[in-house]
Amino acid sequence: MQEQTVKIAFPRQTPEGFYATLKERANAYFNDNNISTYANANMVIKTIVLVSFYFGAYALLLSGRFTLFQDWLLCIAMGVGTAGLGFSVAHDAIHEAYSSNKKVNFVLGLLMNLIGGNRYVWSITHNVVHHTYTNISHIDEDLEVAPFLRLSKHVEHKPIHRIQHLIGFAAYAFSSFFWVFIKDYKKFFAKDLGPYKNKKHPVSELVMLFLFKIIYYTYLIVIPFMVLGIPVWQFAIGFLTMHITAGLILGIVFQLAHVVEGPETVLPDNAGNMEDEWAVHQLKTTSNFATNNLFLTWYVGGLNHQVEHHLFPRICSVHYTALSEIVSKTAAEFNIPYYNQPTFSGAVGSHYRMLKKLSRP
């Protein structure tokens, strides 16, 4: 059967409208300052630091020179490195925002595979589905974290949802583990994927999926177990510690952009038409958080500037802070909401309140 796609239509963007004005101002910023929209020296340095941090911690673990407690701390470090590489390097590369050279983006995008994910599956579920159909219930994959979590008012309420605000963060802790062992396979072999019906995938991507999963399982399970010669229970604690650390960071950060107070979850009309043009839709369904936190901005690759990222996904994240001034000013002129949670803790609290609100029928 031929691949089919559910049709969602956004109103046409007008030349004098918000998005056209915003792009003109953003282009002027880069042209007037003679700045490339791609990675700069700071981004390259960050890439080197994060790659060294992750694989350095791995090498220290394999050295067998540390106590069990120190090895446990190294497992936490690898979890932090996993999330950092995903946020700050692979994410930009898969969006083709890191470099103008497609080969560079492809190679750096493979870091997603090396930390357990899959570049190709991510490019569909995130780049295409989430970025195009942001917070559209039953289509945006990011609203379907687990059946026991209700992240949209348009999802049918079930009894298990009554306790979601109590178990939600614990569920996020296992998101990395689920991603590495289940999610990529599930998405790859799913009959329907977001708006896609009967989605077909290249055979080469199937080979890549299994090849890199084998590489990941080998270097993170087989080799450490053989080299260190530790009991199974000790290895299990370390492995789970790494994934729980990465899962908590990944799960929480991604939820703070869309499932907080302010942004909406929406549905198209019966004909598949959306109320707002695409760019306006992005602002109404997305929120920034802790944008003045310099370390967080560095570590999460500008994902706390989620509004800017959704409007300019092919611009490297190192430029989002500068773009945020342009976006907020232009949004105010067009009377469009620009959501921003001032602090990280405030954003986490807002997400908790949303989980609690959506836990009720």
Image (tube, rainbow, N blue to C red):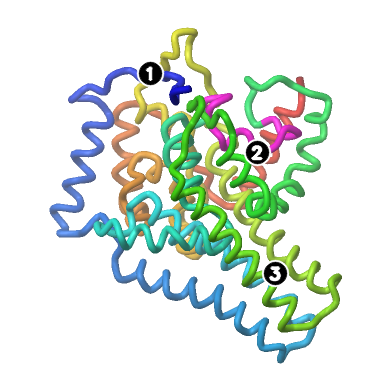
Q: Quadrant of the C terminus?
A: top right
The three-letter amino acid code for the residue at tag 3 is Ile
Pointer 3 with pointer 1, Cβ within 8 A:
no
Which residue is drawn at the image coordinates 63% and 41% (left, top)? 186
Which image quadrant for residue 349? Answer: top right
Query: Where does label 2 land, which residue?
Result: 145
Q: Residue 325 vs residue 294: left or right? A: left
Determine whether 21 is above or below 169 in the image. above
The three-letter amino acid code for the residue at tag 1 is Ala
Which residue is drawn at the image coordinates 57% and 68% (left, top)? 81
Characterize the local packing of mark 1: few (<14), some (14-19) or many (20 or more) Cα atoms within 10 angstroms: some
Residue at the far top: name it: 270
Query: Where does label 1 land, which residue?
Result: 9
Over which residues does the magenta segment extend? Answer: 136-150
From the viewer's side, name the closer residue of 44 and 290: 44
Q: Specify which label sits upstream in the sequence, 3 or 1.
A: 1
Q: CA distance from mark 3 to mark 1?
A: 46 Å
From the viewer's side, name the closer residue of 208 and 328: 208
Characterize the local packing of mark 2: few (<14), some (14-19) or many (20 or more) Cα atoms within 10 angstroms: some
Q: Residue 237 vs residue 92: left or right? A: right
Label for residue 221?
Answer: 3
The three-letter amino acid code for the residue at tag 2 is Val
Q: Is residue 142 magenta?
A: yes
Q: Specify which label sits upstream in the sequence, 3 or 2.
A: 2
Q: Nearer the viewer, mark 3 or mark 2?
A: 3
Determine whether 268 is above or below 105 in the image. above
From the viewer's side, name the closer residue of 25 and 87: 87
Q: Is residue 132 magenta?
A: no
